[in-house]
Image (tube, rainbow, N blue to C red):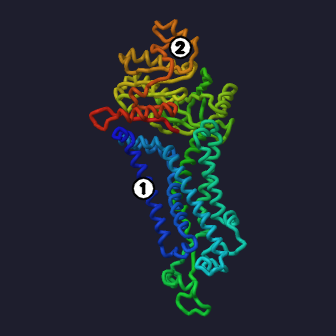
Amino acid sequence: MGNWLVNHWFSAAVLAAWLGINIFLFTYYFLFFDRDERYFYTRAILGSALAWARASAKCLNFNSMLILLPVCRNLLSFLRGTCSCCRRTLRKQLDHNLTFHKLVAYAMALLTAVHTIAHLFNLERYNQSQQATDGSLPAVLSKMHLQDSKWLNPIHSNQTTVEYVAFTTIPGLTGVIITLALILMVTSSTEFIRRNYFELFWYTHHLFLVYFAGLVIHGIAGLVRGQTEQSMAEVHPYHCAEYLTQREQNCTHSCCKDPEFGSIPAESWKWVLAPIILYVFERILRVWRAQQKVVVTKVVMHPARVLELQMQKKGFCMEVGQYIFVNCPTISPLEWHPFTLTSAPEEDFFSIHVRAAGDWTERLIDTFQVETPRIEVDGPFGTASEDVFQYEVAMLVGAGIGVTPFASILKSIWYKFQQADQTLKTKKIYFYWLCRDTGAFAWFNDLLASLEQKMAESGKADFLTYRLFLTGWDTSIANNVALHFDTATDTVTGLRHKTIFGAAHVEHRVCSGGCSPPQALAKSLQKSCHQHSSLDPRKVKFYFNKENF
């Protein structure tokens, strides 16, 4: 447990605070609507379903307020910059933005289910009370004020059905629409959909516009009502409720007057107004920045269908390991895809490497082989890799094209050695790269060879230790390696370090710094960091960072 706290104590505190606020809101408003005297008559018809619907609605408003904040990437980058002097643990939490975004979304899905089911019970009880002829309190309340606006039961005739109310009233129709929008957004954001059908995920996720528009106007009509303050003063339910079912035609008692009811004011807009304004400014900034001219200075087609784009843009400033969003209007004017920058901050251009991994990337590669289309760029945005030089020892683990953030880091190290940078805190870097085929190594070989040479000239040949793992190979490659086993350089890459055939077991070694591997390897590394970290400040702590966007 102590080892786990080294990496996750602050995340646990944030999670506990979020859960605590949700539990408090639900409990407080459940008890409020279950006991408050203004809703005495409402409870007479609806029972406890009223409290379930209203309590879940308050929690939905709270989580709707939070859901946009983790995807305000400019805000996160700003906070990361302003927190540069803060503890590493605090800055790390910004890298969990998408995890928190998903957690809030799942909570919203659960609360929506509770809210919807509770209101289905409410509508059914409204309908039963309207049709009742037994003279019970719900039946009497349902027949009051049918000709004016002071009614309690929104169903005013025996011919009105639950389905009619659900699909013709503002709360009913908007409730159906935002529920469907939420279902589509949640189901299309699964790992399988995002990896294999990114366009589907991208377009359906923009239903959040429908969700927030519906949420703001959902409670305007006020179908669920309570007794007005003026009516409470005249005919308090605790004193007068029994007279409603027993009063005579010529009743002169003070309780003989019919209670009057008013709607609950719509409050959702108060919860989401500030986040919506913040997100609108975020989008305006991103649109303005994306419209700035991008010049593609160089296009390189590497083996294994990896496209390298070197670009320039006025005012563009980056840090190691950051990423950008790229749009190609020739392919699709609406689709923006994230790519990690592979260039170093010291270079006069910025670059990305694009692997064919879907319809959009396939079309982008094919397009650049024929012409140089217009490219729009939004960013850069920060990641955990920015902090890599804050560690004395860093271990970088990448798989396939996931090595791209480390290209930026290693290039920056090369420039720091060129400039004899004395402020470099990092003393040792371990770099592990896993690839399925030899072609994937090709575009990275030159950088590693230059690093080897420069570090040897600087007398720091041991500064970088790297291991390349080839997980997909055949007997012809193995025979060639065996034949040239005694040569000074590797037969696959031409580098000083030999390629290792088979899977890596890097989780048994150092695991601080950055990580950009597949999920299974990432979980293994994270577990290893937890196991070997110590709470004792005099001993070693391992910090796990993973690229997320």
**Residue 72 at x, y percent in the picture:** 52, 47
Q: Is residue 117 left or right of residue 344?
A: right
**Residue 4 at x, y percent in the picture:** 37, 39
Label at residue 443:
none
Q: Three-letter amino acid code at disc 1? A: Gly
Q: Residue at x 67, y 75 (%)?
A: 131
191 vs 45: above or below: above
User: Tag 1, which secondary structure?
Assistant: helix
**Residue 163 at x, y percent in the picture:** 69, 64
Dot 1 alpha-carbon crowd within 10 angstroms: few under 14, some 14 to 19, many 20 or more: few
Q: Nearer the viewer, residue 497 or 257?
A: 257
Q: Residue at x 58, y 56 (%)?
A: 113
| Residue 274 seen in the current view | yes
The earlier-in-sequence mark between 2 and 1 is 1
Residue 221, image quadrant: bottom right
User: Tag 2, which secondary structure?
Assistant: loop
Q: State the quadrant of the N terminus.
A: top left
Q: Is residue 526 left or right of residue 144?
A: left
Q: Which residue is mark 1?
A: 20
Q: Which residue is mark 2?
A: 492
**Residue 240 at x, y percent in the picture:** 52, 84
Q: Residue at x 61, y 46 (%)?
A: 187
For marks 2 and 1, give the one nearer the viewer: 1
Q: Three-letter amino acid code at disc 2? A: Val
| Residue 424 seen in the current view | no
Q: Nearer the viewer, residue 193 or 369?
A: 193
